[in-house]
Image: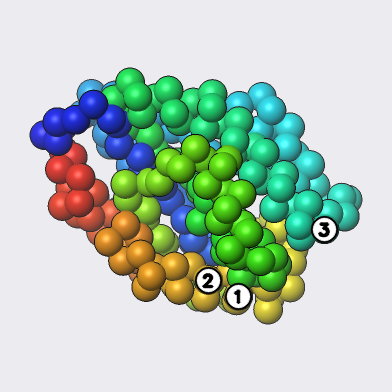
């Protein structure tokens, strides 16, 4: 890694349902790992024991959860992963690849669930210890196309929300990208995984000087 500093590098992947963020975040992790860089992979919510328990509550379709409660549960899982993994790893100079972070709560619970966005950001600042990603890859795909990809299995509680909700989520992401264009880079999802992957690697190399 050519970039010399005492802090690590934090890269997050975001996007609406079916965009392929889990696939592409894992591909980038494996790419950097092959280069023998000090990289770790996490997912939100989850990764920690506490986070995985919260994840199971959030995604269980049998649970009825108010949008405000949903937001706070995501923040609780996030606070745990920041304290347990993200903050220590960044201090240790590691590269972190994360499948979602605070932007997801702003877009899903804020734009999608209509929870006050300013309040989400204030709670988020506390939960994240003011840690902000160095780079966010926003994988963009039309909502109908993304949900169609998910139709091969039973939707979880978040995926099962109305189409109008998911459209607000996508528009929220695109709004954030316009507001924070230096950090958030929009990548249009291609039909072939390798083509989308090539776009992502180009951005990562140019933005963060990674191999």
Residue under pointer 1? 168
Q: Are marks 2 and 3 in contact (CB under 8 Å)?
A: no
Q: Secondary structure at mark 2?
A: helix
Q: Are marks 1 and 2 in contact (CB under 8 Å)?
A: yes
- Of residue 121 and residue 171, the one placed in the foreground of this image is 121
The residue at 32%/50% (across/down) is: 135
Spatial distance from mark 1 to mark 2, Cα to Cα?
6 Å
| On-image quarter of the C terminus | top left
Q: Residue 26 placed where, x, y %? A: 41, 40
Number of numbered callouts drawn: 3
> Is residue 210 toward the left or the right of residue 38 in the image?
left
Q: Residue 126 placed where, x, y %? A: 56, 42
| On-image quarter of the N terminus | top left
The residue at 74%/52% (across/down) is: 70
The residue at 69%/53% (across/down) is: 71
Q: Secondary structure at mark 1?
A: helix
> Is residue 124 toward the left or the right of residue 207 in the image?
right
Residue 144 visible? The answer is yes
- Of residue 64 and residue 187, the one placed in the foreground of this image is 64
Residue under pointer 3? 66
Q: Earlier in the sequence, mark 2 or mark 3?
A: 3
Q: Secondary structure at mark 3?
A: loop
The residue at 18%/40% (across/down) is: 210
Mark carried by residue 131: none
Q: Residue 122 placed where, x, y %? A: 57, 53
Residue under pointer 2? 172
- Of residue 35 and residue 179, the one placed in the foreground of this image is 179
Spatial distance from mark 1 to mark 3, Cα to Cα?
17 Å
Q: Residue 206 placed where, x, y %? A: 15, 52
């Amino acid at each position: 890694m050519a970039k010399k500093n005492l802090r690590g590098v934090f890269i997050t992947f975001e996007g609406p349902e079916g965009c392929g963020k889990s696939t592409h975040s894992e591909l980038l992790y494996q790419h950097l790992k092959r280069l023998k860089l000090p990289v770790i992979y996490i997912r939100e919510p989850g990764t920690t024991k506490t986070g995985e328990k919260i994840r199971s509550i959030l995604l269980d379709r049998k649970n009825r959860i108010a949008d405000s409660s949903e937001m706070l549960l995501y923040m609780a899982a996030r606070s745990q992963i920041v304290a347990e993994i993200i903050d220590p790893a960044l201090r240790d100079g590691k590269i972190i690849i994360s499948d979602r972070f605070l932007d997801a709560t702003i877009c899903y619970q804020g734009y999608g669930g209509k929870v006050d966005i300013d309040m989400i950001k204030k709670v988020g600042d506390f939960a994240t210890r003011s840690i902000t990603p160095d780079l966010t890859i926003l994988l963009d795909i039309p909502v109908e196309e993304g949900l169609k990809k998910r139709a091969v299995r039973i939707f979880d509680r978040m995926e099962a929300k109305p189409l109008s909700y998911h459209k607000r989520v996508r528009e929220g992401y695109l709004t954030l990208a316009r507001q924070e264009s230096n950090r958030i880079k929009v990548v249009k999802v291609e039909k072939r995984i390798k083509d989308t992957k090539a776009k992502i690697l180009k951005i990562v190399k140019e933005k963060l000087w990674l191999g």
